Image: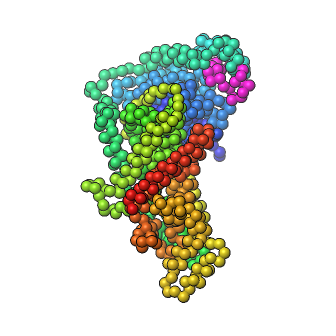
Amino acid sequence: MTKERIKIALAGNPNSGKSTLFNALTGLRQKVGNYPGITVEKKTGICNLDEDIKAEIIDLPGTYSLYPKSIDERVAQQVICNKDNQAYPDITVVVADATNLRRSVFLITQIIDLKMNVVLALNMIDLSISKGVIIDVKKLSDQLKIPVIAINARKQEGIKNLKKAILKATSENTFEDFFSVKMLFKNPIEDTNKLRGANNDYASFLALCMQEMSGERKNREELHAISKKHRFNPSRAQAQETIKRYKKIDVVVDNCITVVKVKGNRSITKWLDDILIHPIFGYVFFLSVLFLIFQAMFSWSAYPMDLIDSWFTNLSIWVANTLPAGVLNDLIVKGILAGLGGIIIFVPQIAFLFAFIAFLEDTGYMARVGFITDKLLRGFGLNGRSIIPLLSGAACAVPAIMTARTISSWKERMITIMVTPLMSCSARLPVYTLIIAMIIPTEQSWGPFNLQGLVMMAFYLLGFLAALGTAFIMKFILKAKERSFYIMEMPSYKIPDWRGVIYTIVEKVKVFLFDAGKVIIAISIVLWALSSYAPGNKFKEIENKWADIENAEVHIAAEKLESSYAGIIGKSIEPAIKPLGFDWKIGIALITSFAAREVFVGTMSTIYSVGDNSTQSIRERLESVKNPDTGKAFFTTAVGISLMLFYAFAMQCMSTLAIVRRETNSWKWPVIQFLYMGVLAYISSFIAYQLLS
């Protein structure tokens, strides 16, 4: 028997617990994509409401009202208000923060007036009670004339009642206006109803305010004509409707809420904020958090990384000895397994990085970071909202750049987009980890602290300082007359929802393994082919040259690699990169890692395993490489630092350039970004190598 399926939209203000409820309802049965035609993350999942009915749940971007002020809010408004939208729901569940009911109710009442099936999920009711705010849920339901269910999404309390309410609401279609907007704008709404061929006053009012209906030019012109005829000013109409609506909301909230005095003069939130947003201690705490994150990433991930490394080494040995010698054996061991090992070994560190980021966001601390950094960032042409994209850039620049949409000022948004890729993202993490492990022994420390972790943190801070310096220069280049103001709601501190953190880790690791991994494996195979073949009979000539010399295998392998197609490509760019301390093999890695920075490790693993009969790990192979001019180790401290600086600053990410093109709607900005970051990378690497060598 096929289950009936309904479509549910989860709507609500930012920080209302909407995503936590989404995870509670769907578990791991969810997928992430983009809304059609726009780079806004779309999360959908499947939930069983009962034995016969499944629900497809869409987690909409957070919004305070149906008057969008950002691209994310625009998407939420389009889904809720446009019946022609593929994502239009059968029922909307609005998640409200019980600790701030008045603010949450505004969006709910707008959706009620659209005559939609709606259920209110009153979240964090326990936190509200602890603050002395008692909500009469039944009275609130009677006042709004919709089902209201008290839940605790983190503890998964009230979820069964919510499912029952959703099922009941889908079969009941009695709609009553909360606020009659027609009382204020009767004539323009009646004309718009006729134009739309529908008798929905609030939908017509929103169409007039947005000057849009079904996205058709003819309709926009007719709406403009109605506005002109009745002297309807959209901005003034929104303000007038908002004031009147809030007056009615205040009556409802006052009737349903009882405030009692709670023992103790200072709340935990106030006590923590005194420390975390202090003008001095706030920065000390923030830097301490970053320091602990990078120390933990190195120490905690060491054991699982060693296990993965040894497992792949043993697997390579087994495959090499089991399969018959030949091209297939060579391809699997030195092409596929070498590339695959270069990906999977870094999963523990990437998992820890995203776990820490999800943890900080879930506790409410990230909003405080935005607050304390606002004054600092304004001096560099940014504002407090810029810190979220910048810190998110430590995970991945693509979604980080997308979060810059919340910045209302064009100038500050553009500067944020242009400098965010300078933040050291997780794609650089494998590069840093590999090189740091080669040039700094594990046992080296600075007092009680691991020196490898300190160097890693230094490169992350270097990316942040480079972003600030570049932003400061762009502050004087980009011109804009608008003034911006930083207003951000401080969410309550919360114990992290560990299920949500785990979902985030799983999702991000999947993206790394399957999205970046596919590219890395494909390039590894191509590189193996380029490194294993040469024009004409070049390989045969090399074998004949060394035929009568004993133990010539190493020389033959080196000459073959240099004469291969990959060697020819690398040799062509070697003169340009030699001043940086790089050879032609690194040159190949620089080219291939433009697809994704993570490809560097897979490329180096493949390049240095071709022609090598050993099954060493990538780190051991690189440590054994000798400089042909000096006979000493090639990967010295000077080469390592130069290489890390190049990867710290260079724009080697096609996905980032594509998203910048999409967000700015122009190729001008990604081209500028690619050029200035390339120049910065080259100069920095050149100076570092020349000084250190």
Specify the farthest residue to the bottom. Answer: 548
In the rendered structure, the answer to whether residue 523 lies left or right of residue 368 reads right
Closest to the observer: 13 or 489? 489
Q: Position of residue 336 (x, y in %)?
A: 56, 66
Compared with residue 378, is residue 529 higher up or lower down, i.e. above or below?
below
Closest to the observer: 682 or 4? 682
Q: Position of residue 67 (x, y in %)?
A: 56, 25
In the rendered structure, the answer to whether residue 99 lies left or right of residue 548 reads left
Specify the farthest residue to the right. Answer: 218
Q: Position of residue 503 (x, y in %)?
A: 48, 47
Residue 374 sits in quarter: top left
Q: Which residues are magenta?
A: 199-222
Q: Position of residue 599 (x, y in %)?
A: 53, 58
Residue drawn at x 62%, y 13% is 185
Residue 162 within the segment the image draws in magenta: no
Residue drawn at x 69%, y 20% is 223
